[in-house]
Amino acid sequence: MGALVKSSDRLAAVEVVAEEQNQYLTFLLGGEMFAIGILNIKEIIEYGSLTEVPMMPEFIRGVINLRGAVVPVVDLSARFGRKRTEVTRRTCIVIIEVETNEEKHDVGLVVDAVSEVLEIAAGEIEPAPSFGTKIRADFIHGMGKVGGKFVIILSVNNVLSLDDLAILEHAAGEGVPQLAEQQA
């Protein structure tokens, strides 16, 4: 009988460990708290050295040279249909990796300020609401409950769809000659 109790205790412990602890980078955008899964994030850099690319959509700020690679930069606020982010000393570019058709692309996201990395259990994430948010519902992966407040967890692949990535690749291609001239 004692063996059964021990075995059920082990099962309970395994279930607790199996409950996924997801880590998310939280950041501010227009006074609201958002989050992106930490596995999508490559690095966070200071805002600067941005080359604007003419005739791009409003949400594309330009491109940066990141260790020799041309990385397109998206203004997340403008992507959500809001006004462009005002650059302050806390403004950052979050470099994320987006995967489409088994290809990986680096994209920079302009955010007001980076906050912290939080662990949010899968059980603490509610489905995206169908109304009441100021951004498209398909951009939201879920609403994480943290300390009695909600954090909007973004679905990176929806925020940067295949069509957007095609535009971003074009922007990166257009920015290459300009970046080469700047480095010469």
Image (cartoon, rainbow, N blue to C red):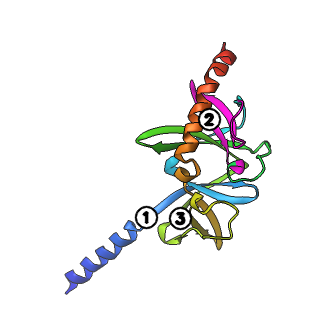
Answer with mark 1 or mark 2, whichever residue precedes in sequence.
1
Q: Which residue is mark 1?
A: 20
Amino acid identity at mark 1: Glu
User: Residue 55: x, y in percent?
Assistant: 71, 33
Q: Dot 3: few (<14), some (14–19), or many (≥20) neighbours within 10 Å?
A: some
Residue type, label 3: Ile
67 in relation to 84, above or below: above
> Left or right: 139 with respect to 133?
left
> Mark 1 packing: few (<14 Cα in 10 Å), some, or many (20+)?
few
Sequence order check, earlier mark of 3 and 2: 2
What are the residue bounds of the magenta stretch? 54-78
Report whether 143 appears left or right of 56: left
Q: Give the foreground label among 3 and 2.
A: 2
Q: Circle 2 — which element? A: strand
Quarter of the rendering occupied by the C terminus: top right
Q: Which residue is mark 3?
A: 120
Placement of the N terminus among the 4 image quadrants: bottom left
Compare marks 1 and 3 and give the one earlier in the sequence. Answer: 1
Q: Position of residue 41 (x, y in %)?
A: 54, 45
Residue 65 falls inside the magenta stretch: yes
On the image, numbered disc 2 is attached to which residue? Answer: 72
Residue at the location (38% across, 67% down)?
17
- The dot on residue 65 is none
Residue at far bottom of view: 1
- In whole angstroms, how far apart are the C-alphas of marks 1 and 2? 32 Å
| Element at label 3 | strand
Give me the C-alpha separation between circle 1 and circle 3: 9 Å
